[in-house]
Image (tube, rainbow, N blue to C red):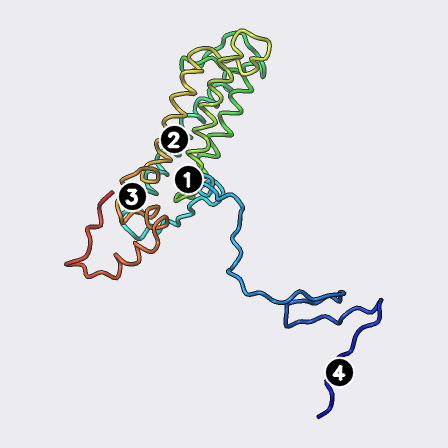
Amino acid sequence: MAAHTSRTPAPHESYAPHAAYGCHQPHEHYAPYMAHEPYESHAPQRSHLVRRLLHPVNARLDEHLPSDHKLSKIYRVGAGLTGLLLVVFGVLGLVHRIGFFDTGGDTVLALNTNGALSVLSICIGGLLFVGALIGGTFASTLNIVLGLLFIASGFVNLALLDTGLNFLAFKIPNVLFSFVVGVMLMWFGMYGRVGSALPHDNPYWRARHPEQAARERRAPRGGGPVLHGG
């Protein structure tokens, strides 16, 4: 039997890569392979709220379904009516030929206004008209975002009353109007989308619970689970 001989590398010679150990780079020594459990990640787990913010539910409304059609109609009506109110307010302000940054106390529909506020109202009203035409989740999201902006505008302009930065000529009635419009838009946008007891045929509930929704679709109609629950 031939004697077993092993080749010892020269002092500065590296071992060739050994793919069996997952190594693809030459180096001096190999550590023996030790089986182990999969490594656990020590990265902090994201909270449910953070995951919701980073990956919001993007439910697609199917207006051929009764529940989806009802929701889309509400979003459209909310955006359309609010947009019409803002456009009328803005047009009346422009018709009165009020200065663009005039703060002299000119009023339209019992609200203080100037040219800048009139143009801004028309632009926002036009954007709401676009939401009313598109409908669906886009109109819902647009209502919520603009509602938040109206509420924020109320607080900001409340702080700017009687200062030189009150470029939109806001008075207390304007601040209250911003709050009312903001809450109204948010209500229209959140209707049927936010809540702890959405019905199970709701498109947003289906998007948040796809596995349970699939089970309920496969269940017999007579003995399946009740579709309207918390």
Where disc 2 sits, the SS reads helix
Q: Are marks 1 and 3 in contact (CB under 8 Å)?
A: no
Q: Are marks 4 and 2 in contact (CB under 8 Å)?
A: no
Front residue of 172 and 126 = 172
Front residue of 221 and 225 = 225
Q: Position of residue 158 (x, y in %)?
A: 48, 13
Q: Are marks 2 and 3 in contact (CB under 8 Å)?
A: no
Q: Position of residue 12 (x, y in %)?
A: 85, 67
Disc number for residue 139 = 1
Q: CA distance from mark 4 to mark 2?
A: 82 Å
Q: Which residue is mark 4?
A: 5
Q: Nearer the viewer, mark 4 or mark 2?
A: 4
Q: Which residue is mark 2?
A: 186
Disc number for residue 156 = none
Position of residue 9 relative to residue 115, above or below, is: below
Front residue of 169 and 148 = 148
Which comes sooner in the sequence, label 1 or label 2? Answer: 1
Which comes sooner in the sequence, label 1 or label 3? Answer: 3
